Image (cartoon, coloured by chain):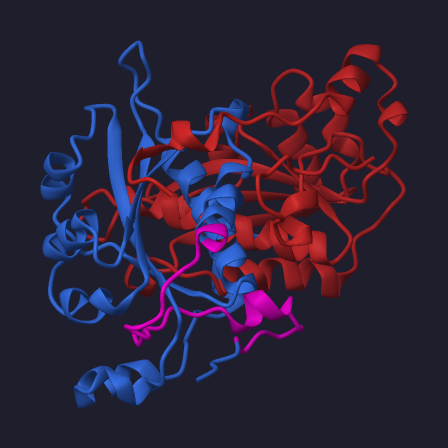
Chain colours: A red, B blue
Amino acid sequence: MKKKADSSVELHPILAERWSPRSYDGTAEISIPDLTGILEAARWAPSSSNSQPWRFVVARRGDHRFAQMVDSMAGFNKVWSPKASALILVAAVTIQPDGTLRPAALYDAGLAASLLTVEAHHRGQVVHQIGGFDHAAVIKDFNLAPEITPIAILAIGKQAPADALGDPKMVEREIAARTRVPLESLILSGAL
Amino acid sequence: MKKKADSSVELHPILAERWSPRSYDGTAEISIPDLTGILEAARWAPSSSNSQPWRFVVARRGDHRFAQMVDSMAGFNKVWSPKASALILVAAVTIQPDGTLRPAALYDAGLAASLLTVEAHHRGQVVHQIGGFDHAAVIKDFNLAPEITPIAILAIGKQAPADALGDPKMVEREIAARTRVPLESLILSGAL
């Protein structure tokens, strides 16, 4: 199903049609070129002083990393995400070698994750970002160094019809309209 | 000038051709539909629990906000950015009403800023993100509330030839190849 953004001007089709479904085709596999392209899109993102602070753990359905990521999730995420073709943990190097914090690394990781998402949609995949997971568990499972902060797990795969979710509450959530606050509420100063 | 990403697989043309130039056409004005589309692209980004923590200050060349943003910048940024058609300060609501920190807001703001950039390129604009500015000055100038963290100023406009920068060092920097660390260095775990 499609849920086009209700924007006041027409957006690029990928941006207008991108949303975060939870209904994935549990039989679809993602090809290596698609997975590579998705990660290359993140790699070529801009960052503060070209610091490239984004890091990834890459899991494909069926491997042990995939199972570990699903295990780390909270609530409904654990129910729908196993049908994704891949799960990618996005993390950032938030502490510099001299011990100082780099909060901009979180922003930069967001820049990369969005370009990843655009490339995924371009390749016929959909992406749903999951923040509800046990950070301590993934730090332990993937032996993340102290300077690495896990941020989100991205579920990537082929979209399935909303009904495939089964649970009526999840179906209702899947078909609900996308909503955003008005643009005016986001602009602190400066008229258009 | 073009500087296509040297990726191992072909990326969406906007992602492959996006880079962060400093040479802008100082006579070009950005239209209201283009500026609106760019901000709408950010507005429709995904965020943690749809919290939409991104905020913007919008300046167009010639207005007082534009001059204030340029004044806040450090070094060379102050030299090239005045030729941009618009400057957009990206900020995030990093403190919740109950006083707790929301570090994910920085990541979410990054998600929005990248979609903004994709829409800008789609509309024939280029974007260069500037982290080198006086945060205290913009907080004062734009009367940002305590829960709002300024992150980056995005210079948006029409790209001009590298030579237009004048200064040979800036021209050299403009034409230098784009570089990234190898994809393998970004993947902490999980083979492709």
Tell me where residue B144 appears, x and y as whole percent.
20, 30
Kindly tell me whether residue B191 is visible in this rendering.
no
In the picture, measured across the screen, residue A53 lies left or right of residue A167, that is: left
Stretch of the chain drawn in magenta: B5-34
In the picture, measured across the screen, residue B178 lies left or right of residue A181, that is: left
- Residue B162 found in image quarter: bottom left
Q: Residue at x 74, y 30 (%)?
A: A22
Q: Residue at x 30, y 16 (%)?
A: B100
Is-magenta flag for residue B33?
yes
Residue nearer the viewer, A155 or B43: B43
Q: Residue at x 18, y 51 (%)?
A: B69
Tell me where residue B52 appears, x and y as whole percent.
46, 29
Tell me where residue B187 appears, x and y as whole percent.
53, 56
Figure check: A101 above or below B13: above
Callout count: 0
Which quadrant, please, contains the C terminus of chain A? Answer: top left
Kindly tell me whether residue B85 is visible in this rendering.
yes
- Residue B174 found in image quarter: bottom left
Figure check: B7 above or below A97: below
Q: Residue at x 52, y 79 (%)?
A: B4
Magenta stretch secondary structure, dominant = loop
